[in-house]
């Protein structure tokens, strides 16, 4: 019997390793009630899976993960159940993607200045048409054998504060939340215990945040309990997912988190109210 959902999945259209078709096949084998493709700052993976779905497949939820910065802290806002044809949302994403590619080129330039032989074309090849991110640079460095492992690229060159690091111009939290609401969707803070972004929850609630991600591979049971209590106190919705990427110690396997179906029902209720009010 279908009992679980997974509302946090990535494809190779952002920084995952599975193609949309491969991810859909994994979901089919797990028989989830519903799933959300939440690639970073792009809808390409979601749109491709939407075209590939067949009758009887698990319900596909519109999703995207916005990269945001607040008080010099990186946070991620998950958007769900929005109008996927919303023009302001698409324009904002397109502009952001242009900035990601420019940043990727700047990282390559810094690597070259450090004596590392790598080209931006190699990075673009790893990205495969997705907006360029540091994972694609890391993959290109590993393919070049400039580093011993994918993770080593971050430790040695491109991680925060490392020699080839270039800061990213992210969305402001207010901007991301307003974009989601204008598209009649709901905004959820991703993995609040990562980098202690939970400390910003009350500020984000004042900006209109709808919910928090309770279940995540990086959350211990004590974290889950704390976040459930916080959600109840602040009248926030709950969400959760595996944050599947196909790589990385902080990410789970598809369907690995015990996210109850009721969480999705509540998210849908909130999104329906937003549609009624517009």
Image: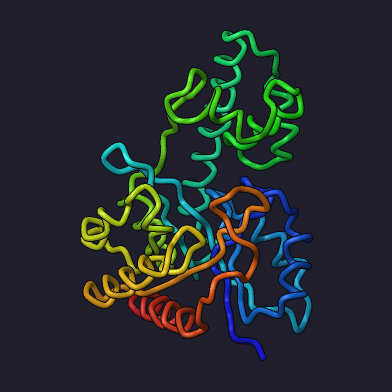
Task: Describe the colour scheme in one phrase.
Answer: rainbow
Foreground pick, 182 / 157: 157
Q: Quadrant of the N terminus?
A: bottom right
Q: Position of residue 256 (x, y in %)?
A: 60, 69
Q: How many marks?
A: 0
Foreground pick, 211 / 256: 256
The residue at the far bottom in this view is: 1
Foreground pick, 275 / 11: 11
User: With respect to residue 268, does 254 lie above or below?
Assistant: above
Query: Residue 123 is drawn in which quadrant?
Result: top right
User: With respect to residue 96, does 86 lie above or below?
Assistant: below
Identify the residue at horizontal 69%, vertical 27% (top origin).
148
Q: Position of residue 7 (x, y in %)?
A: 54, 68
Residue 132 seen anywhere in this rendered image of the structure: no
Identify the residue at horizontal 60%, vertical 62% (top origin).
37
Identify the residue at horizontal 64%, vertical 78% (top origin).
59
User: With respect to residue 79, does 72 lie above or below?
Assistant: above
Identify the residue at horizontal 61%, vertical 37% (top origin).
135
Q: Position of residue 55 (x, y in %)?
A: 77, 82
219 with respect to 177 (left or right): right
User: With respect to residue 214, does 65 lie above or below?
Assistant: above
Q: Quadrant of the C terminus?
A: bottom left
41 with respect to 190 (left or right): right
Q: Position of residue 177 (x, y in %)?
A: 35, 57
Residue 16 seen anywhere in this rendered image of the structure: yes
């Amino acid at each position: 019997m279908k009992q679980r959902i997974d509302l946090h999945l990535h494809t190779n259209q952002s920084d995952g390793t599975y193609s949309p078709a491969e991810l859909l096949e994994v979901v089919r084998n797990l028989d989830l009630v519903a799933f959300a493709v939440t690639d970073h700052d792009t809808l390409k993976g979601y749109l491709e899976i939407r075209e590939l779905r067949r009758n009887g497949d698990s319900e596909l939820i519109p999703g995207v993960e916005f990269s945001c910065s607040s008080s010099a802290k990186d946070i991620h806002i998950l958007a769900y159940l929005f109008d996927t044809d919303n023009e302001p949302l698409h324009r904002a994403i397109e502009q952001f993607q242009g900035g990601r590619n420019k940043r990727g080129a700047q990282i390559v330039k810094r690597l070259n200045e450090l004596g590392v032989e790598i080209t931006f074309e190699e990075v673009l090849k790893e990205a495969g048409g997705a907006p360029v991110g540091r994972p694609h640079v890391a993959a290109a460095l590993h393919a070049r054998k400039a580093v011993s492992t994918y993770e080593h690229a971050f430790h040695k060159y491109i991680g925060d504060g490392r020699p080839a690091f270039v800061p990213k111009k992210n969305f402001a939290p207010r901007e991301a939340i307003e974009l989601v609401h204008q598209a009649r969707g709901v905004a959820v803070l991703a993995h609040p215990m990562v980098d202690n972004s939970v400390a910003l929850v009350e500020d984000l609630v004042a900006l209109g945040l709808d919910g928090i991600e309770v279940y995540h591979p990086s959350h211990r049971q004590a974290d889950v309990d704390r976040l459930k209590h916080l959600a109840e106190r602040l009248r926030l919705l709950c969400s959760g997912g595996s944050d599947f990427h196909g790589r990385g110690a902080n990410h789970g396997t598809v369907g690995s988190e015990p996210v109850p179906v009721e969480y999705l029902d509540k998210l849908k209720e909130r999104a329906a109210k937003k549609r009624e009010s517009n």
